[in-house]
Amino acid sequence: MMTGCRTSTEAAAAASLLRIDLDAVAANYQLLSRRLATAACGAAVKADAYGIGACRVARRLARAGCRVFFVATLDEAVALRAEVADTGVDIAVLCGALPGTESVLAEHRLIPVINDPGQIARWRRAGERAGVPLDAMLHVDTGMNRLGLSPRETNRLAEDPELLGGVNWRCLVSHLACADDPDDPENTVQLDRVRAVRARLPAMPVSLANSAGILLGPDWHFDLARPGIALYGGGPQSGRKNPMHRVVTLLGRILQVRDIEPGMRVGYGGDYQACSPGRVATVAAGYADGYLRSSAGCARVHLGRIALPVVGRVSMDLITVDVTEAPEAAVFPGALVELLGGRNTIDDAAAAAGTISYEILTSLGRRYHREYLEDAAAG
């Protein structure tokens, strides 16, 4: 069934339709869980679950058995906790325990992913004030050079484990930099570094694998994986067949159709010039909706099985499509063309725009009428 929709009249009046299959998200989660065998499977739902809708995704994944969710910021975590109040569900905050946030983290039963020695000390003091050691995860950098304890800081903790005292360490976390390329030797380098760190620090579970890391194989799985893009239908590894179920379908509504003659130009700057007689349809989607401007001249939309080129520039609210090859009876104001879907996946759209599927999803605009598809029994 469809959940969280406006009335059918409102849907019909909407410029474009975004359909999100929550059961496909759950199926992707189960597929990844089976790959992990004995390791637990968490879920990255940061950035509003990559634009899909964090609260809806988390509730669906919780029913599928997910017990650990990762978000980027404290605001994301607090909002998610209000929707997923189950005490058996953990929410980890990747930015860690920033100064002044300790009481909020504790109040909402959130788990900071600690990134530096200062955070360790502040979180220990927060536990002392609470009268009990508080849960946290320890993030060590093994090659990304972003967040996480540096090798020097990690070495200091290994030499003086008492610095880790007063905190209930739930997990040792690191992040793979190159897992989307399974042949990159950095994957093995980071694996060896994680093993070395684990051997020197007090015993705790380990989390290394993201979506692509799960597909690298059992050596990278450890105790807890935290997939993201694969849950939402994106291909985890470049150049490899995508095993995931499609989650997103985006349909754009045709607003107007017009005939054009040779020499006529279309859109801002007249970048596209017709070489022969044809027809152009104007479709309600633009860069304000996350239809990336860099897609111009490369992207395709679909009408049934027919691929139709996007011509001219992508503007704020509109794109123009060459519909000359489509049956005239199928192209009219109010008709829908597929912008994202089975014939134009988020990976296809990313390739056309010169970007990655993550940006395609996280750019999805709020003007689309959103329809969440979910099995009635599960929902």
Image (cartoon, grey):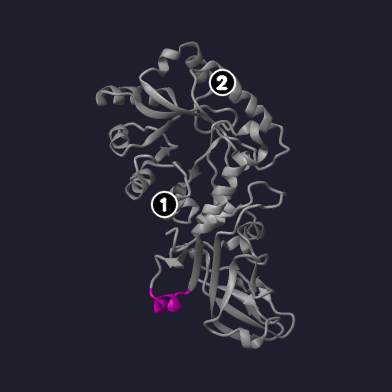
Asked which quadrant contains residue 170, the reply is top left
Q: CA distance from mark 1 to mark 2?
A: 34 Å
Crowd tier of the residue under label 2, counting other residues whose Cα lies within 10 Å: few below 14, some 14–19, many 20 or above: some
Q: Of residues 358 and 111, which is closer to you in this image?
A: 111
- Vertical comparison of 105 with 355: above or below: above
- The residue at which mark 1 appears reads as 59
| Residue 184, x across and y down, in percent | 71, 36
Q: Amino acid at mark 2?
A: Val
- Vertical comparison of 80 with 143: above or below: below
Please report the bounds of the magenta region as a residue range.
7-15
Per the image, label 2 sits on a secondary structure element best described as helix
Magenta region, main secondary structure: helix
Residue under the point 65% across and 31% down: 219
Residue under the point 63% across and 28% down: 191
Q: Is residue 265 magenta?
A: no
What residue occupies the far front of the structure in this picture? 377
Q: Amino acid at mark 1?
A: Arg
| Relative side of 284 to 188, left or right | left
> From the image, which quarter does the C terminus lie in?
bottom left
Please report whichever mark, 1 or 2, sits nearer to the chain's N-terminal start.
1
Per the image, label 1 sits on a secondary structure element best described as helix
Residue under the point 65% across and 41% down: 215
Q: Is residue 8 magenta?
A: yes
- The residue at which mark 2 appears reads as 197
Asked which quadrant contains residue 302, the reply is bottom right
| Residue 370, x across and y down, in percent | 45, 66
Is residue 113 at least partly visible in the picture?
yes
| Residue 346, x across and y down, in percent | 60, 58
Is residue 271 at least partly visible in the picture?
no
